[in-house]
Image: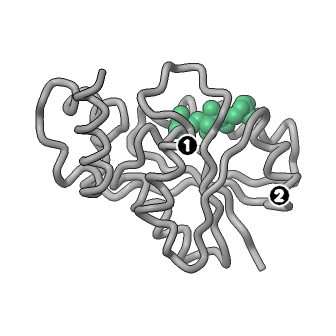
Amino acid sequence: MTRALIPGSFDPVTFGHLDVIARAANMYDSVQVSVVRNYSKAPLFTIEERIEMLQTVCGSWDNVSIGSFEGLLVQYAREQDIRVIVKGLRAVSDFEYEFQMAQLNRQLDSSIETMFMMTGTEYAYLSSSIVKEIARLGGSVKGLVPDYVEACLQQKVRRT
Ligand code: PNS
């Protein structure tokens, strides 16, 4: 039984994330999507809101569960007895940072592998930051995030 961990900020979850989650769920027996708690950037959504959005849009998938973690990713993976971390790669610009993290994580725990999945080209330009900016500036995020997340974004930007 191979389990995979998909870590991230998910502030908020986009169709790009969901593409990677769905494809990983087809490859691994189970997938745990985990929201990082010690987040250095100032998030728009709280941890609870981000978890709730993930649960709403992919929590009903049979082999996908949603969680959160604090501290080192490899330590959390080890505690959960998960040996595979799955990351999405959108473009060359993601590569350097992801390569650095994968190398350091491997140095911290060589029993945990990082697997990279190329994001579908239709999502290569998509990021949570861009989605938040469009929403803040009053643009439509249809087609970039699920309808539920779009509604959460609209509610949030109206209040901030
Ligand atoms: O969605 P993001 O912001 O790209 O996710 C980044 C994340 C959560 C994967 C990364 O920041 C992380 O792994 N944080 C946990 C802390 C950690 O283990 N740092 C050492 C990595 S070398």
Figure check: 129 above or below 12 = above
Figure check: 52 above or below 55 = above
**Local secondary structure at mark 2:** loop
The residue that disc 1 covers is 48
**Local secondary structure at mark 1:** helix
Image quadrant holding the N terminus, namely bottom right
Q: Nearer the viewer, residue 158 or 14?
A: 158
At a point 37% along the width and 52% down the height, the residue shown is: 16
Q: Nearer the viewer, residue 136 or 40?
A: 136
Q: Is tag 2's residue or tag 1's residue first in the polypeptide sequence?
A: 1
Q: Where is residue 24, by image quadrant?
A: bottom right
Q: Where residue 57 sits: x, y (%)? A: 41, 62
The residue that disc 2 covers is 80
Q: Which of 38 and 95 is in front in this view?
A: 38
Within 8 Å: ligand 1 and the Cβ of disc 2? no
Q: Where is residue 40, by image quadrant?
A: top right
Q: Which amino acid does label 2 sit on?
A: Gln
